[in-house]
């Protein structure tokens, strides 16, 4: 059974950094799949933050995080990371990783079929 587990969230001051991890298991098409990071703030819709292609390693970012966030993957550990630098209060939310197959790089949440439980990120002074 495919499983995704996020970790690394927490409370950080504006301008600080966090590194999120998404550990996957039960995943026989890990090398082919797109894995994405999404977030949801209270009262707002879930939005795509970044995604990475298993085949090419190509990446895609939400405009407001471009240059501040970096997605990467460690194939030996079946884990995808999201390094978040220069964090802002508006980055606050629950961060989820998700995956699926049969589509290219996209930040549209409804395309992804498998989701983790999420990890809370709070940016506040």
Image: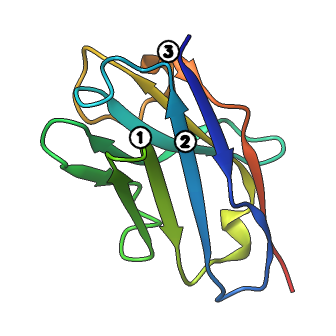
Q: Earlier in the sequence, mark 3 or mark 2?
A: 2
Q: Is residue 53 left or right of residue 36?
A: left
Q: Residue at x 83, y 45 (%)?
A: 42
| Residue 113 higher or lower than 21, as above or below | above
Badge 3 element: loop
Q: Earlier in the sequence, mark 1 or mark 2?
A: 2
The part of the image, by quadrant, that contains residue 86 is bottom right
Q: Residue furthest top?
A: 1
Q: Are marks 1 and 2 in contact (CB under 8 Å)?
A: yes
Q: Is residue 60 left or right of residue 110?
A: left
Q: Residue at x 24, y 31 (%)?
A: 31
Which disc number belongs to residue 23? 2
What is the quadrant of the C terminus in the image?
A: bottom right
Gap in angstroms between the C-alphas marked 1 and 3? 18 Å
Counting from the top left corner in percent of width and height, residue 89 is at: 74, 73
| Residue 122 higher or lower than 112, as above or below | below
Q: Residue at x 45, y 76 (%)?
A: 68
Counting from the top left corner in percent of width and height, residue 123 is at: 77, 73
| Residue 11 higher or lower than 47, as above or below | below
Which disc number belongs to residue 113? 3
Badge 1 element: loop
Q: Residue at x 25, y 14 (%)?
A: 102
Q: Earlier in the sequence, mark 1 or mark 3?
A: 1
What residue is shown with label 1?
78
The part of the image, by quadrant, that contains residue 6 is top right
| Callout 2 crowding tier (Cα within 10 Å): few <14, some 14–19, many ≥20 | some
Counting from the top left corner in percent of width and height, residue 11 is at: 83, 72
Counting from the top left corner in percent of width and height, residue 101 is at: 31, 17
Which disc number belongs to residue 124? none
Q: Is residue 50 left or right of residue 88?
A: left
Foreground residue, 33 or 103?
33
């Amino acid at each position: 059974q495919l499983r995704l587990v996020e970790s690394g969230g927490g409370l950080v001051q504006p301008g600080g950094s966090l590194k999120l991890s998404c550990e996957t298991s039960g995943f026989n098409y890990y090398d082919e799949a797109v894995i994405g990071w999404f977030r949801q703030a209270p009262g707002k819709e879930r939005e795509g933050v970044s995604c990475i292609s298993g085949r090419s390693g190509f990446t895609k970012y939400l405009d407001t995080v471009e240059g501040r966030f970096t997605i990467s993957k460690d194939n030996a550990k079946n884990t995808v990371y999201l390094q978040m630098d220069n964090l802002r209060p508006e980055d606050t939310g629950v961060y989820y990783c998700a995956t699926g197959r049969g589509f290219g790089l996209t930040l549209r949440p409804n395309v992804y079929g498998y989701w983790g439980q999420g990890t809370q990120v709070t940016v506040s002074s």
